[in-house]
Image (cartoon, rainbow, N blue to C red):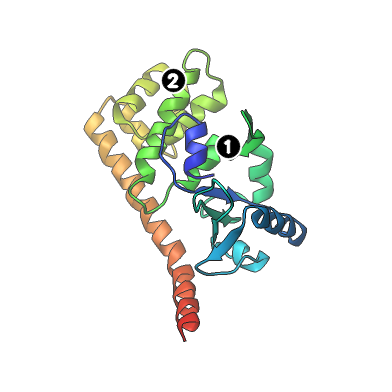
């Protein structure tokens, strides 16, 4: 998940770390700790890696010291706001074969997009690029599921208008739950832009509310460490 996954989907991003979504169960975390040990990864910040912390939505952070890794940061999560439980994410995952690395499992595109709906400024342009890259690859013969994803997640006003023209019936159905599509069906680009801003503002607000109690916990733990 994260920036490296965006690169694999063709939405180029320079990412200095590796973000991992993991199954938060004791045997799996033991395997993860063994792998981190091979990378000479030390925990940084708080909290410590545990089933409880991951299921509560916290991220656990590590920095590698093994040869050639150049202090590579690794962030581990299991529960993400707005995303399905890990078991469902795993069933939908994309598997890619990378030279020198073998098979790699990546969050499905729809799940990666959902995970990117945060309060961080850099994530929203990335959602736009993910959709545009997917459309570029599959525009000739998209299936209904892919068209539904484009209509649900595209963040480029002109592109959304074009999608509504090409897939009018699907757009009319999807407009019941996405007001931006109503404006796009009418070809009203300024109204589409306004609707997209409202979507983004609502998601940013939800993300802030989600993280507020978790950040309060982190602050207390950091204060305890300093004492």
The numbered mark at residue 136 is 2
Task: Tell me if label 2 and label 1 are in contact, CB under 8 Å.
Answer: no
Q: Earlier in the sequence, mark 2 or mark 1?
A: 1
Secondary structure beneath dot 1 equals: loop
Q: Position of residue 113 (x, y in %)?
A: 48, 41
Q: How many marks?
A: 2
Quadrant holding the N terminus: top right
Q: Is residue 148 above or below residue 141?
A: below
Could you tell me residue 72's position as x and y percent? Answer: 51, 51
The image shows residue 68, relative to residue 37, as above or below, that is above
* Outermost residue, top side: 140
Q: Tell me what residue is drawn at x 56 percent, y 55 percent.
A: 65
Helix, strand or loop at label 2? It is helix
Q: Quadrant of residue 164?
A: top left
Q: Nearer the viewer, residue 186 or 64?
A: 64
Q: Residue at x 45, y 35 (%)?
A: 152
Can you identify the residue that label 1 sits on?
A: 108
Is 72 located above or below residue 111 in the figure?
A: below
């Amino acid at each position: 998940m994260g920036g490296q996954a965006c690169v694999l989907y063709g939405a180029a991003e320079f990412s200095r770390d590796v973000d991992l979504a993991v199954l938060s169960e004791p045997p799996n975390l033991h395997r993860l700790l063994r792998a981190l040990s091979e990378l000479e990864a030390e925990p940084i910040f708080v909290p410590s890696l545990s089933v409880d912390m991951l299921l509560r939505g916290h991220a656990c952070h590590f920095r590698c010291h093994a040869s050639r890794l150049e202090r590579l940061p690794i962030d581990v999560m299991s529960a993400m706001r707005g995303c399905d439980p890990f078991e469902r994410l795993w069933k939908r995952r994309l598997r890619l074969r990378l030279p020198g690395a073998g098979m790699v499992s990546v969050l499905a595109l729809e799940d990666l997009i959902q995970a990117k709906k945060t309060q961080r400024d850099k994530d929203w342009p990335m959602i736009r690029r993910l959709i545009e890259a997917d459309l570029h690859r599959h525009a000739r013969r998209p299936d209904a599921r892919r068209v539904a994803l484009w209509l649900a997640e595209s963040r480029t006003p002109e592109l959304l208008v074009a999608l509504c023209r090409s897939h009018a019936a699907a757009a009319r159905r999807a407009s019941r739950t996405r007001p931006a599509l109503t404006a796009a069906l009418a070809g009203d680009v300024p109204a589409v832009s306004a609707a997209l801003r409202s979507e983004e503002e609502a998601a940013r607000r939800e993300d802030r509310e989600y993280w507020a109690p978790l950040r309060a916990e982190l602050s207390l733990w950091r204060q305890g460490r300093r004492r």
